[in-house]
Image (tube, rainbow, N blue to C red):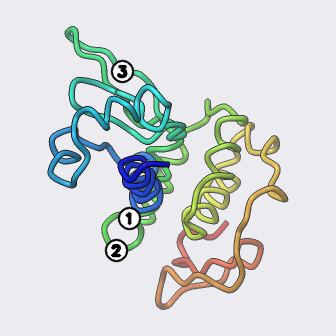
């Protein structure tokens, strides 16, 4: 393996390890980080990066993104389930738990297989636990098809309210008004 190949291999490893799935990578930014256009093109051809528009890419296989088209523009946006998880990641500091639950109540048409895949790949224990608790509390019909045994829910309690009440099944401490 020549020196150039070794450098490119360490660059792709860095790119895959340091940047979150779903993070939009701009081509110009990648150039400033030492990934020239030719190398980006090579990564797209090999399947490491996926183009989502002019000058924008994602690491391949970001889960929960859907195509959105309007006025001749086509971009990837978060599906409703993924957008819900993104909201939950902001709770309770930057997004209200009560508002997040109210949003979850409206998600009655989610597809269980897609939700399962998102929950399986999600890295945040808090998000997974909140998503499951809120969807169960909302009484969504798709919830019964989720296999919780396949989802890593971690251990120990996650306190999201002080004072709060423990929801033992999900090890979440939540405000009293969010309990069943």
Q: Are marks 2 and 1 in contact (CB under 8 Å)?
A: yes
SS type, badge 2: loop
Residue farthest to the bottom, as pictured: 163
Residue farthest to the top, as pictured: 72
Depicted 122 relative to depicted 140: above or below: below
SS type, badge 1: loop
Residue 8, numbered label = none
Structural distance between the alpha carbons of marks 3 and 2: 30 Å
Q: Position of residue 9 (x, y in %)?
A: 45, 51
Structural distance between the alpha carbons of marks 2 and 1: 6 Å
In the rendered view, does 147 fall on the left or right side of 153? right
Residue 90, numbered label = 1
Q: Nearer the viewer, residue 71 or 137?
A: 71
Which one is in front in this view, the residue at disc 1 or the one at disc 3? Answer: 3
SS type, badge 3: strand
Q: Position of residue 165 (x, y in %)?
A: 61, 84
Q: Is residue 87 visible?
A: no
């Amino acid at each position: 393996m020549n020196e150039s190949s070794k450098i490119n291999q360490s660059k792709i490893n860095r790119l895959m390890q340091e940047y979150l799935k779903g993070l939009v990578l701009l081509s110009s930014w990648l150039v400033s980080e030492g990934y020239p256009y030719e190398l980006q093109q090579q990564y797209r051809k090999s399947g490491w990066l996926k183009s989502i528009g002019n000058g924008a890419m994602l690491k391949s296989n970001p889960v929960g993104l859907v195509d959105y088209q309007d006025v001749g523009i086509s971009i990837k946006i978060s599906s409703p389930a993924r957008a819900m998880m993104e909201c939950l990641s902001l709770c309770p500091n930057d997004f209200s738990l009560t508002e997040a639950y109210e949003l979850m109540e409206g998600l009655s048409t989610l597809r269980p297989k897609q939700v399962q895949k998102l929950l399986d790949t999600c890295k945040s224990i808090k998000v997974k636990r909140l998503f499951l608790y809120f969807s169960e509390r909302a009484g969504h019909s798709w919830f019964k098809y989720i296999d919780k045994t396949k989802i890593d829910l971690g251990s120990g309690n996650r306190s999201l309210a002080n004072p709060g009440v423990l929801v033992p099944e999900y090890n979440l401490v939540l405000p009293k008004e969010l309990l069943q």
